């Protein structure tokens, strides 16, 4: 299956750096405004996921334990037609994501899924 979520080289490098301090990591993308709609990176075990979260992808990044990427189910309803790329930009977010003290923040870049990807992921085509 083709990836639903990918990371840029800059984001992967930051994740490798963060893992040396925090150990295994995970992402959660929630709904909300401002930084509430940015992907938040946490050490595994510091954020609890539940029945209202969707596991979109387990990211495989060389040199790291697999990184699970979750999204709240309500946010997924808005974003289910998109492919996500985690990128890294300058600037400190105001959330609790572990990259914040580095003067960087993760952000999502997105594009619409192709018809083939929609079929592959089992998402009903847009009307």
Image (tube, grey):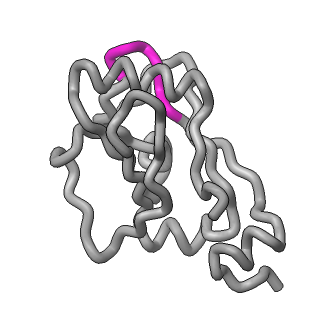
Q: Nearer the viewer, residue 124 or 9?
A: 9
Image position, residue 93 (x, y; %): 42, 28
Residue 72: say if magenta. no
What is the number of callouts on the image?
0
Q: Residue at x 45, y 40 (%)?
A: 35
Tell me where residue 43 sits by quadrant. top left
Tell me where residue 115 sits by quadrant. bottom right
Q: Nearer the viewer, residue 75 or 1?
A: 1
Residue 105: say if magenta. yes
Q: Residue at x 61, y 65 (%)?
A: 79
Q: Quadrant of the N terminus?
A: bottom right
Image position, residue 62 (x, y; %): 47, 31
Bounds of the magenta segment: 100-106
47 relative to 24, above or below: below
Image position, residue 99 (x, y; %): 37, 24
79 relative to 28, above or below: below
Q: Nearer the viewer, residue 120 or 33?
A: 120
Q: Quadrant of the C terminus?
A: bottom right
Image position, residue 40 (x, y; %): 38, 42
Tell me where residue 102 sits by quadrant. top left
| Extreme residue in the left direction | 45
101 vs 37, left or right, is: left
Q: Residue at x 50, y 66 (%)?
A: 75
């Amino acid at each position: 299956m083709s990836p639903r979520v990918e990371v840029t080289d800059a984001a992967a490098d930051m994740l490798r750096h963060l893992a040396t301090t925090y150990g295994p990591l995970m992402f959660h993308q929630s709904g909300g405004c401002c930084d509430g709609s940015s992907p938040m990176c946490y050490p595994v075990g510091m954020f609890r996921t539940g029945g209202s979260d969707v596991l979109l992808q387990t990211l495989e990044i060389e040199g790291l334990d697999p990184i699970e990427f979750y999204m709240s189910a309500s946010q997924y309803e808005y974003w289910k037609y998109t492919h996500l790329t985690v990128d890294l930009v300058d600037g400190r977010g105001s959330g609790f994501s572990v990259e914040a003290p580095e003067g960087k923040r993760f952000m999502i870049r997105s594009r619409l899924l192709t018809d083939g990807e929609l079929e592959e992921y089992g998402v009903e085509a847009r009307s």
